[in-house]
Amino acid sequence: MGSDLVSACVFCAGFLLGMEAPVWPGLSADIGVSYATVARSLDRPGGRDLSDVTPKFLFLAAGGARPAAPGLGAGTPVAEWRLRVALAPSHDEQEQTPFSTQNTTATGTGRYENFAIALRYPVGARDSLEAGWNRRTHKGTDLVNLGGERFVFGEQRILSAERVDVAAGWRHRWPGLEAAVSVRFVRPSGSTGTSGAFLLTRGSIYGGGVELRARRGRWTFWGSGDLASGSLDVHEENAPNFIARDFSAPARLEAYRLGTIFSAGNIEALVTATWDRSRLPFVALAPLGTETVAFEEGRHPDSRTREFFGEGSVRYAIARAVRVRAFLRLGYGTETVRLTDATGANPDRRLDVRRSGVFGAGLSRALGSPQVTLGLGADFRLDMDR
């Protein structure tokens, strides 16, 4: 299945043309559940500004595959189709501590609707044409308290964050080795709307990706990287006059991943490490109260993230056609948000935001708790004739 569709991070890298553990030959299906969190926090005098979003996913997948000739490649099928779906209700929470009547707080609900399609078409015994489509989106509605008494909400906030990836590529196989290259179209978008501000960003950026996989005995190793960059269209307006500001701003999404699989009998164990960076001219997932106030003052955000994710999973065949799987993904990161005044009358502000989890102090006081994605699933082989 892969954990990309069941992560709370909408703009992190996803699996388009690569894969994790090998899939069944013939027809197969996956089902499972997952819990995920992502939080953004900012240190304040005597406290902090913390915002988080927590989805609980149900995921389903179905597909068909034909393996490569024995000895060729490193586990990817020579022909394949696969559809993946992950749906989740989510809860948003934002607070500033210690409490005062100058604070901004919010609480609300939302939903994740994530989909992915992968296609692989054989061109001879060693080569495959590949295509992938991946859409991850989060939409939420919050009740916001802008400096009032506790539990007295003054307005509503609408949030939308989405990333759509489309890729096409070529994969070539040698004995125990394979390599792939692809071109990519990425459409990130985000919007934040309150009674005092409306920010909408959308557009398309372009790039590519590479992957190298090797298999030796019980071990499979792979490395991959993808990058897309360009400019996005930004529309902003704020109280009291709501004068429209339209301009283009730079955007960049990139990720680099290393992984390994060990197979022995009925057990497969997988470990991956991912370095993910982004630059986006908006904040539309778990915005802070500090940012909400800044948007209503007419400030424009420029967000730059740096995140590391480590993941482990174990899959065990409990029957000839049934495997169960458990996985855990942890992440840490930092984010720099620069807030510029559209009028130029006020100096720029810089927010050093920590991207972590929601479970207290965590592993260290400096890092906080990690972002968490954990889940259980099972996959079934439906075509036993192959």
Image (spheres, helix red, strand yellow):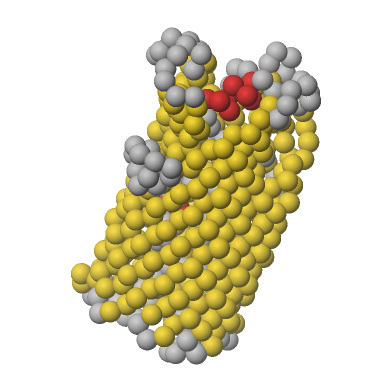
Front residue (pair 221, 83): 221
Who's the residue at 25% across and 69% down the image?
Answer: 316
Q: Position of residue 258 (x, y in %)?
A: 49, 68
Viewed as shown, does residue 304 lie left or right of 29? right
Viewed as shown, does residue 269 lie left or right of 342? left
Q: Quadrant of residue 339?
A: top right
Viewed as shown, does residue 243 lie left or right of 337? right
Residue 298 visible in the picture: yes
Q: Position of residue 9 (x, y in %)?
A: 49, 46
Who's the residue at 42% across and 17% down the image?
Answer: 99
In the rendered image, the vertical position of residue 82 relative to residue 125, given as above or below: above
Who's the residue at 67% across and 20% down the image?
Answer: 297
Q: Quadrant of residue 290?
A: top right
Front residue (pair 264, 72): 264
Q: Position of residue 243 (x, y in %)?
A: 76, 20
Q: Position of residue 311 (x, y in %)?
A: 39, 60
